[in-house]
């Protein structure tokens, strides 16, 4: 290959990419052009590397691509269009594609909670071995309800949000190992079943569900989604299918990252409900109705927007074009 001729043929494209990278602000059209030029120059670098070992030219194009990639990433992340695309395409597609995993986790945990609750109601000695009569009385009469109004609503919402987001992140982070996710989920529902049995035995079952359901439906669903995604990540290396184990884990790991980011917003909503609705003076039917509405909206989000996003080709993974660019740059 005539390197000088190749440089002359494509120098204007490299200069244009440098110009776009140097601009302080880019319009929507210029941002799209930046990505397009990046793809072109990535191809040029691959050609130069394989056809002519010019170290200075390779270094120049590599540096240009690195700066362009950083600029393109920053541009896409900080634009409202990118944020909107995340919540209308990538996040709902990830939820929909992995729906059977987290719906299975949700159903299993509901069954386990119900079985544990019924069993504990028939074996009062178990809960009595965990708590003294005085502690049980305090829980029933003061502690359980007081928990939701102990702090200022705004501070409580932030505390609940951070705690639940942490639990969800743990479910995904430990997903690669499998068993820790099961342990986290079991610990969560076991605590719920124990408190529920105590409240039911004391004749406060309706009060218990009236305080749990407004926020708990959406909150626990988010945790179960994280658990399902974590287990899917575990299964990605147990049974990678047509992909290699590394490819399968990489794809599901990127999708898990998508879900974690989206669940931060879902858990923020449940935290706001827990702080402002659960302890409010609204009648029980109104508070529970708000919880059911939030849960119904989440499922509609998954099965309406998520299904439509999947039909448009989204999977919850990174944009295929970005992945191809990364491969071309590494070539």
Image: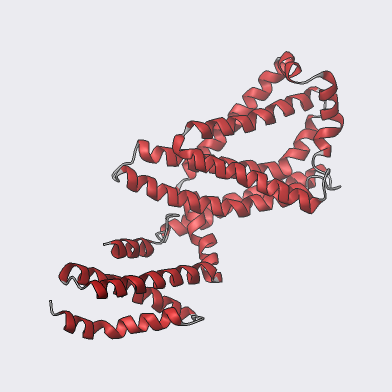
In the figure, 60 relative to 122: above or below?
below
The answer to which of 206 and 133 lies nearer the viewer is 133
Residue 32 in the image, given as x and y percentages of width and height: 42, 76
- Residue 168 lies left or right of residue 27; in this view the side is right
The structure residue drawn at horizontal position 50% and vertical position 54%, both measured from the top left corner, is: 258
The answer to which of 49 and 152 lies nearer the viewer is 49
Does the image show residue 102?
A: no
The structure residue drawn at horizontal position 60% and vertical position 52%, both measured from the top left corner, is: 264
Residue 269 in the image, given as x and y percentages of width and height: 68, 53
The answer to which of 173 and 317 lies nearer the viewer is 173
Residue 288 in the image, given as x and y percentages of width and height: 75, 44
Residue 111 in the image, given as x and y percentages of width and height: 59, 29
Quadrant for residue 315, please give it: bottom left
Does the image show residue 240?
A: yes
The structure residue drawn at horizontal position 33% and vertical position 41%, both measured from the top left corner, is: 240
The N terminus - image quarter: bottom left
The answer to which of 6 and 39 lies nearer the viewer is 6
Q: How many marks?
A: 0
- Residue 202 lies left or right of residue 55; in this view the side is right
| Colour scheme shown | secondary structure
The C terminus - image quarter: bottom left
Going by the picture, which residue comes out furthest to the front? 56
In the figure, 73 relative to 231: above or below?
below
């Amino acid at each position: 290959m005539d390197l000088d001729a190749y440089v002359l043929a494509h120098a204007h494209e490299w200069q244009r990419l440098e110009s776009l990278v140097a601009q302080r602000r880019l319009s929507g059209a210029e941002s799209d052009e930046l990505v397009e030029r990046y793809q072109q120059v990535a191809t040029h670098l691959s050609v130069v590397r394989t056809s002519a070992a010019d170290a200075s030219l390779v270094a120049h194009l590599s540096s240009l691509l690195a700066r362009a990639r950083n600029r393109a990433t920053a541009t896409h992340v900080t634009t409202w269009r990118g944020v909107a695309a995340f919540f209308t395409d990538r996040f709902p597609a990830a939820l929909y594609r992995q729906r059977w995993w987290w719906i299975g986790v949700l159903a299993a945990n509901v069954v386990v909670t119900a079985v544990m609750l019924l069993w504990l109601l028939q074996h009062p000695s178990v809960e009595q071995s965990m708590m003294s009569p005085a502690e049980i009385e305090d829980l029933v009469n003061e502690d359980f309800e007081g928990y939701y109004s102990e702090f200022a609503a705004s501070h409580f919402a932030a505390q609940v949000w951070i705690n639940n987001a942490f639990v969800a992140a743990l479910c995904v982070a430990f997903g690669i190992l499998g068993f820790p996710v099961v342990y986290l989920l079991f610990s969560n529902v076991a605590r719920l079943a124990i408190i529920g049995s105590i409240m039911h035995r004391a004749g406060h079952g309706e009060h218990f569900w009236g305080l749990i359901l407004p926020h708990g439906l959406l909150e626990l669903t988010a945790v179960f989604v994280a658990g399902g995604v974590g287990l899917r990540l575990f299964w990605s290396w147990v049974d990678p299918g047509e992909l290699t184990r590394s490819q399968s884990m990489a794809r599901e790991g990127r999708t898990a990252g998508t879900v974690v980011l989206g669940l931060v917003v879902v858990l923020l909503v449940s935290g706001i409900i827990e702080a402002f609705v659960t302890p409010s003076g609204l009648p029980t039917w109104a508070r529970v109705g708000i919880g059911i509405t939030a849960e119904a909206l989440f499922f509609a989000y998954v099965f309406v927007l998520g299904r439509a996003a999947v039909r448009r080709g989204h999977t919850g993974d990174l944009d295929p074009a970005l992945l191809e660019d990364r491969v071309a740059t590494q070539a």
